[in-house]
Amino acid sequence: MKINVNRNNLWSRIFIDQLAVMRVQHACISPGSRSTPLTYILSKNRKIKSFIHIDERSSAFFALGLAKVTGKPVLVITTSGTAVAELYPAIIEAYQQRTPLIICTADRPAELIGTGANQTINQHNIFRNHIRWFRDLGLPSISDTGFYHLQKIAIKAYRISSSENRGPVHLNFPFKKPLEPFSYTDSVSKNIFRTKPQRLIRTNSQISTPKLEKSKDFKRIVSQLTESEKGIILVGPMEYDDKLIKKIKELSGLLKYPVFADGISQLRFSVNKKDNFLISNFNSMFASQKFISEHNPDIILQFGRTPTSTIMEKFLEETDSVRYTIDTYGDKHDPARTANLIFAIKPVSFCETLISQLREENFKRPKSNWSKDFIRAEEISENLKSKIIDRAKFPNEPSIITEILKLIPSGSNLVIGNSLPVRDLDNFAFKSSKKIKIHFNRGASGIDGITSTALGIASIKKKTFLITGDLSFLHDLNALAAAVKYSIPITILVINNNGGGIFESLPIANRVKHFDKFFITPHNLDLGEIIKSFGIDHQLITTRKELQRHLKNSLNLNIPSVLEIQTDAVRSVELRIKISSETKKNLDKEF
């Protein structure tokens, strides 16, 4: 018996059904004509939840947020032409941070490329510099062989994206018209629908771990660690991994090494009284040349990405310490190019193996002044910093970070924007017993898409807060449409210094004649009116009490809200300088 089908839709159904079996749960779609087959099939699929976005760039960053919080690949669907290019910023970020996305771009058939056909560009491997895998699927092939090949591609895309070479993958889908499901292209046997998704497949997200203890390099590092009491554990930006955090703390306690915890390392939260070896004020310490010269470590173990701090980067460039970095895929997070070796292994496996080895050797380090000095310097720096910030007139940018951290409840998700917010978090975020998960876009560290990313996170994880700058906020205004459409409960805190505040902190601020004209980007916009035009609650915060009241009120809302805090960039720079110079002076005196 023969039935009429649309080959584009049948092809799309085979593909989407296979991904659903692989447990893909979310898709972000920007509707368009050429992507109709993929969009239509997703609209019928009950296993994959779809979010519809006007703006492709916002859609891709929203998908990035979903993938961050679920740890699973998220589908991104778009039509052909420049819509494809709009995905690139989020793809770059996903590539740099190894966040799993499956990018599906609809395309015109190959014979139309270069002919002047409408909405047609060369999409072949367009993201080649920032993609983990690419396949052009060619025009749909309505046959058992074609379907089997398509399923294999779906399976491989999932495996690469989720584990084998984690990150974004790109699949290009050329389609010929007609695209609509009710426009038939073929008359086929009903038996064609016997093709079922392949279910007996391995989707283990774990990558294999080598026998680390048998490695000569590992034996050497064990020897160095047992012989030297002067070591530090450096933890840079890192996605939340509760098991790894526990193992790093355990390793630190065994080695008696202080842990330098980046503001977005996750280690500054869920801290208990025993965690006094966690150091959050290393930027203040390393501003003191005297302290550095007397506390230069012999060995450094580095986990996570490149540190947020430029002071730490400079230290890593100049130190003669032996340094080992540990990364699952062997990615380099070493712009100073001074690391002695990269261990391409899961960090938690590295810690477990190292701890086991040290215990087998009955290793026990006698007490020393090495870690005591760092703990003492931490106390001095924290007390002084807190005193200066508490006395400073509110609002100012450093105190905004500390106030928000005091106010948000345990169990919150905090998304931190780039430029000044992430640097202020690194400099001023205190250690806390609250369980807070930090999310960030530090792959390429751009200001684009942070609101969309935060909304992707908040759509799954409630009690989410975003701290962002005014330029970052304006850069991603389209995201607010999705916030309203899906009633996403998020509190967005916008630090508004009227543009360009970060440049006030740079040496160029005092040395360029036309600095204000070329480096400061004042927008002079009324953010409140813009926010209200989306139908979102807006509050202008001028005092600590107002921040406390409105932040608390936002927790009771199941809709998005924005708290705007206007600051003086120059005055905030002066406060940062005062904190740094006073801390340096006190550390020089103490040590």
Image (tube, grey):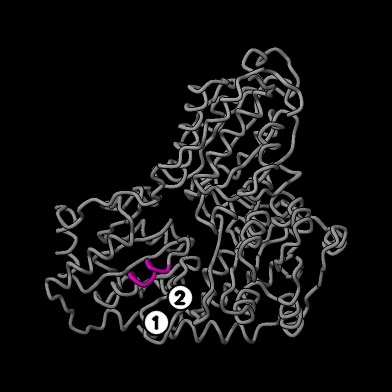
Q: Position of residue 208 (x, y in %)?
A: 29, 49
Q: Nearer the viewer, residue 143 or 261?
A: 143
Q: Is residue 188 left or right of residue 480?
A: left
Disc 1 or 2, which lies upstream in sequence?
2
Residue kind at label 2, given as amino acid type:
Asn
x 67%, y 58%: residue: 455
Q: Nearer the viewer, residue 542 or 553?
A: 553
Q: Is residue 103 left or right of residue 199?
A: right
Please tell me whether residue 463 belongs to the stretch shown in magenta.
Answer: no
Q: Is residue 358 left or right of residue 231?
A: left
Please tell me whether residue 247 belongs to the stretch shown in magenta.
Answer: yes
What whole-number distance in Å separates the C-alpha atoms at marks 1 and 2?
A: 8 Å
Residue 416 in view here? yes
Q: Please state the extent of the stretch shown in magenta in the rendering.
A: 242-248
x 43%, y 56%: residue: 306
**Relative vertical location of residue 212 with respect to residue 85 in this rendering, above or below:** below
Residue matched to label 2: 281
**Relative vertical location of residue 568 with respect to residue 35 in this rendering, above or below:** below
- Label the magenta part by its dominant secondary structure: helix
x 58%, y 38%: residue: 16
Q: How many marks?
A: 2
Q: Quadrant of the C terminus?
A: bottom left
What crowding class fits label 2: few (fewer than 14 Cα within 10 Å), some (14-19), or many (20 or more)? many
Q: Position of residue 394 (x, y in %)?
A: 71, 80
Quarter of the rendering containing residue 395:
bottom right
Q: Is residue 481 left or right of residue 511?
A: right
Residue matched to label 1: 377
Are the two marked residues, 1 and 2, in contact with CB atoms closer than 8 angstroms? Answer: yes
Could you say which disc has been placed on residue 137 in the image?
none
> Which secondary structure lies at badge 1?
helix
x 65%, y 75%: residue: 400
> Which secondary structure lies at badge 2?
loop
